[in-house]
Structures are given as C-alpha cells and as structure tokens.
Amino acid sequence: MPVDDDRPRRPTLDTIAHAVGVSRATVSNAYNRPDQLSAELRDRILGAARSLGYPGPNPVARGLATRRAGAIAFVVGTPLAGAFSDPALSVTLDGLISTVDGHEHSLVLMRGERGGPRREAVARLRADVVVAYSLADDVPALAAVRRRGLPLVVVDQPAVPWAPRVEIDDERGGRLAAEHLVALGHRWFGVLAFPFHPDGGEGPADHGRRATARYRISRDRLTGYLSVLAAAGIEPGAMPVWEAPASSREAGRRGARWLLTRSPRPTALLCMSDELALGAVQGARHLGLRVPEEVSVVGFDDTPAASGGDPPLTTIRQPLAEKGRRAGELALAALAGDHEHRPFILPVWLVPRATSGPPRFPLHH
Amino acid sequence: MPVDDDRPRRPTLDTIAHAVGVSRATVSNAYNRPDQLSAELRDRILGAARSLGYPGPNPVARGLATRRAGAIAFVVGTPLAGAFSDPALSVTLDGLISTVDGHEHSLVLMRGERGGPRREAVARLRADVVVAYSLADDVPALAAVRRRGLPLVVVDQPAVPWAPRVEIDDERGGRLAAEHLVALGHRWFGVLAFPFHPDGGEGPADHGRRATARYRISRDRLTGYLSVLAAAGIEPGAMPVWEAPASSREAGRRGARWLLTRSPRPTALLCMSDELALGAVQGARHLGLRVPEEVSVVGFDDTPAASGGDPPLTTIRQPLAEKGRRAGELALAALAGDHEHRPFILPVWLVPRATSGPPRFPLHH
DNA sequence: TCGTCCGGTGTTACCGATCACATCGCTGTC
DNA sequence: GACAGCGATGTGATCGGTAACACCGGACGA
C-alpha cells in the first residue's frame, strides 16, 4: 500500500517549532506540560499552531513514543451481526464506556465470527488492554492476546485463570429462578438455554452436549436450575432443554414453541435471558396459552425491556451497568500496572413480576 | 506519565532480525510482503519470531510509518448513557461494523455528552475517518474533525455540506405516516417527537422551539406530518407536539400520557421512532385506551421490536442495516481517496400492522 | 563471452512525536 | 562575589516500524 503523497503534507510539531523559533520539545510541552514553559510563550505557540492549521500532536506518533495505544478493546464473541441488538450487551457496554471514556482512552470494538474473534485481528489490535465479553472458553484469540502481552479483563466469560474478571454467581441466579417456581407449585419445567457450544447449534440439547458445554454461564445457570429441581424431587433427566443460538426474541419464540408442545407440557419455562423469555411469552401466546395462568416464564438479566414489557417479566436481576463499570475500572487498573486477580462477583436478585404464578393444575395429570 | 520500564522489553523486529541474521526490512517483509523473500527464509523468520515470542509488527509503530491509524471512528451524539440501548443505532452500527471489519480497520467508538462529542476527544482520536451518527447540526466537534483533516461520513445527521452522507427522505417518511392515518379517517393528531435541541429538554414543543430545531431529522419528519395534515384541511397550529429527550419507551410513555390527556383527545399518535411508539402504546393502555380502537399509533424505523411487539407496530420502515453498510462503504471509499459527495438516499415504506385503524368516532365531537 | 534482467536482501531515510538530561541565564545567599 | 538553585528551553536518543532504492550474484539471450 503506497502512501499517497499527492495530498499536501500536514503541519507537524516541527512546522510550529520552526515558525515560532523554538525547539520541538517546547512545542510538545506547550500541549502536554503547560507548567514547563511560560504562559506567554505557550500562547505564542498555540497561536501559531492555530494559524498554521496544526491540530495538535498526532495521536499515533504520540502512541509510539509513549508506547500506549490509548485505547481499550472490547471483544465480543457473538457470531456475526446482532451482537448490539442484545440489550444485556448494550447496557454493559454503556457502563464500560462511561467509565473509560474521559480517561484519555477510547474504546475499540472487535467482534468475532463463529468460533470467536480472529487471531490475526488481535495481532493488529491497537489497544493497551482487552476486555473480553461472553466468549467461549479457550477461544484461540485469547492466546493471541496473551502473546501480545496485553492485559485481559474478562466479563462473565471466558474462564481465564490469569485474568481479572467481573461476573455474577450464575448458579445462584439459576437456583433463585427455579426456587421461585418450585415454591409456586410447579412440577413440570422446560429450559430455554443460551448456547452451550459456539457452533450456532439450535435445538433440544441432550445430556452429552450440555456436559461438554464451552460456555460457563450456560453450564452454571443450568446447574443452578437442576440442583433445585433435584432437591424438590423432580427427575431432571426428563426435563426438556432447548438450546437457542443467540439471545433473541425470535430464538425464544422458536424454543418456546417446541418446549410447550412436549408432553407433559411444562407449566413453567426457565429462560437464560430476558430476550429469550420475552420471546417465550410471545410463543406461548401464539399457542393460545395464557401467561402466567397456563405457563409461567422467568427470565434472566432484568434488562429495561423486562420491566417495561407487557406483561412485566419475572426475572433474575443482575447489575449489568455496574458490570460494565467494574470492567472499565479493572481495565484502567491493569493499565496502571495493578494486576489484581481476585474476581469481582456481583449480586443477583429475584424480581417477581407478572409472568409467574401458581400452575393452573398444581398436580399436573 | 513516565514510561514504566520495569516490565521487560518485548521483542521487536530488530530482535528477530538479529536472531536470524537478516535485516529489519526483511523481517518486515516476511509479515507484509511474502512474495519479496524466499519461502524458506520466511519460514525461518516466522519460526524465530514464534520461539522468541514476537507477536508480529507493532500496530502503533506500523500506523506511524504508514500514516494510517487503521481505524474508523463512530461518533454518537446521544447524551451520556443509553446510546446503545437504542435499537436503531444497534442495527445501523451492526451494518457498519460488518462492512469495515475485515478490511484491516477496526472500529473506535466515541460518544458525546450533551452538546455533542468533546472537541478535545476528537483531537486525540486515532482514526483515519469519522462516521458521525445523529449529531446536531454545527456541533463543535465537527470543526475539530475538519481541522484534523479527517474525512467525514454522515449518517442522517448532521447536515455537513463537505461530507458524503447516507440518509433517508425523512419528510417523505413523515408524509407516508400521516397519509396513512388521514386515509383511515383520523382528524385529531398528536406528535411524539425526537429532540429538537440538544439540551435534553422534555415537554410540549411550541412553534418557536420547533422552528429553530438543530436536528434536521426531527424538523423534516415534522414537516412531513404537517404538510399532509394541512393538505387535509387540519389546522396544524393546534396539534400538540411532545418533545421526547431520547428515543426510549419510557420517554414514549410519558409523552403519550400528556398527548392523550389533551382535549380534544387525539385519535392518532405520530411517533418519530418505534421505541417512542412502543412506549406510547403502553402509555395509552395505562390510560385505559385500547390500541388501535381508541388510539392509533404509528412508529418510525421498523426495528426488530416493531414487528415482534405486541401488538405489531404500524410503522415507517427504513433500511437501517443497509444504512450502516453504506456508511461503511463510504468510509472505506474516503480512505481510498475517493471523495464522493453525492448523498446516498435510501427508500422508506409504510408498513401497516396492528396499531393503526379507523378512529372509533370518525367525526370526533 | 559479455551485458542485462531479476529475484532476493540490505541500506538508509523517514513517520511524528516524547523524554531524560544538558544547558543557560538569573536570583538569592552566606 | 562566587556558587548553588531553579525555572525555562534546547539536544539527542528513541519508540518500532515501512518503503524506496541500491546492491549483488546467477541465469539467460545475443
């Protein structure tokens, strides 16, 4: 790629230095260390810069000299499009950006295809620290991050022993949801699950697929559900589990349609996200089932759509925005050389709303 | 900020060059121009790099040498948090990222506070081109972009004469929505509008505020609405217009609550986004009004939530993903030195669904 | 047999800054 | 009155690459 020198060369520090008759370092100081020179000279320099159209020190060159890219990378594993349509991600990202922005760092986004972000994209990444969000365990890109010597901060996933992380107790979240429904008297359940493997698979997930899951979150939430059901004397082996390919309403509708046509029909659906749950509510209605009279639905996350929905969704709340903020703080800390490895575990709560209630026939069949 | 040299220096091109006994340029070629050296030597170099833990050419240094930051900046004007919660943005951004990703460019995000992105953040921006999304006209940050000599691509807003842009015919969209409702027999309207000014104001918008609007989109859509109503002989002066501070359901609910308590009560609500419209539907229901029997609601955008909602929303469709993709193409083109200034205007359609119908009393009063 | 072309590699000059340190002219002090 | 101290500026090395071009030896054509 030849540099196209047809466009006029833009002014640099040198241009200004010559014009004012001082050294390059002094011009640099005018921008970066105002206390190092007299106010009068500084004004002269800045004035000359303005009239010469110099926009300030080139950030890339500065980056080389300071050996900092001046950016933090946010890496999403979600396949292809649609990543940003996930409100859980939106809210988390928003918390993150609100923390790092202003601290002279910008945010660069890197997305992955199926199987995670590309290794070579990591090699080209201009960033000082990487925040990984919702990646499968052991994606090759992470090895590339380590190879580059970049600090890594993990949100939820993947499980990386050498990286600080912020997460919630997903198993506890699962238990809270299941306990709520068991307490209401439900005995027949269906699970609308996150992906277990990064292969885009959709459909009923058998035991083998669940056991080898490469997403810790899906594993933990499912474990939470099952432990409660087992304790309540419910045979977990027979419980239908639908693996959705993504956290979207459309996927939730499809899953619910399958789950609610099993026999015996579940009276309660445990969903791993609010989007899936919202889709499940729609799916149930399409089947002519009333929520919560005939089917209870419990989500996960408590996104804005959950409380604003119709009906408002019973769900497990996790502090999404705070998760983003904490991740930002950890990233900033890593940049400052603070290598804290203690995971940050945020709380979860049950938020009962209008999509859960006692089953119509407490003793189904 | 002193460079912390306590951490061991990482290998560079020189390290590898010395180890293999070739020149720096040859190592560089091994990565960037495989055809410039023998395959055997290339393998030896790459092998040495691997065993020495060299992660490949430093992207920042490469950026300085090639005079490219290797990134495109996406600048959002939306105040503070919540930007990513807007599905219209999500979809557009996704289209954009899917285009530029893979072309050796990453995406850096810059958000603004009230009043737009900060000028100084623009000065520090490591990017080769800027994509501005939904900014008010004349925000100071744009002057900074120009000062830096960065190409600019505009999506929808702001109106910048020297920048290529992609947009829709917003006035036509407004007309389509209004014509649909007029044809159904409506005579009493309310408008749920986007912000007219970047001051976070919320409430009824009088004529003065509307006339000085700094958001072209809000201006044009409103003009579209009003032109149709005027043609139908409806006095536009009396029509209530609520200015929402953001495109969110919560804001929509609040606006609808005010609009639907005017007298005479509007039988139809023209909303500038689907999120506002979805909120309006909820607001109407809270007031005990049935949609569409007692209130018709028409949105704008046709986001996934519009079709998946309950009830499905009558709306104006615009090709959001394509907008993002086109913006990406324009950005890539600008990078390649192609300075095309013809605006890219995408089509809009009316999508009638379940939230619009004839008014209960065609001749109100 | 000699000149030329060509693939492969080294040379050298940047790219546009930052930073540690040297230098310079004053002022204040004993 | 000499010297230390200090604020203000200049010097020179460096950050880690890229790219144009020079150079070198062997193959090939005349």
Image (cartoon, coloured by chain):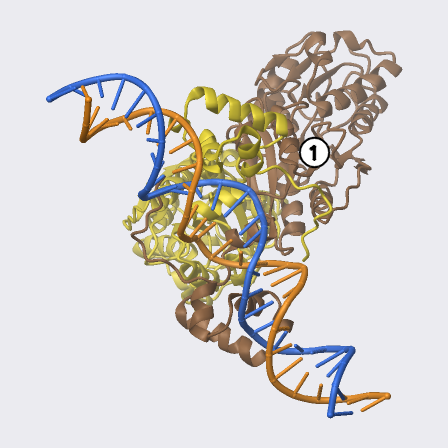
Chain colours: A brown, B yellow, C orange, D blue
The spot of residue B109 in percent (x, y) is 54, 47
Q: Taking C13 as reference, is B262 left or right?
A: right
Q: Residues within 10 Å of mark 1 (few under 14, many from 20)?
A: many
Residue corresponding to mark 1: A313
Residue at point 64%, 27% (across, down): A143
Above or below residue B52? Residue B169 is: below
Q: Quadrant of residue B202?
A: bottom right
Residue at point 51%, 62% (across, down): B119
Residue B78 shows up from this direction: no
The quadrant the N terminus of chain B occupies is: bottom right
Mark count: 1
Residue A76 shows up from this direction: yes
Q: Quadrant of residue A195?
A: top right
Q: Quadrant of residue B146?
A: bottom left
Above or below residue A236? Residue B109 is: below
Q: Nearer the viewer, residue B140 or A21?
A: A21
Subunit bearing disc 1: A
Q: Nearer the viewer, residue B50 or A317?
A: B50
Above or below residue B292? Residue C19 is: below
**Amino acid residing under circle 1:** Leu
User: Disc 1 on helix, strand or loop?
Assistant: loop
The spot of residue A290 in percent (x, y) is 66, 24
The spot of residue C22 in percent (x, y) is 64, 67
The spot of residue A344 in percent (x, y) is 80, 38
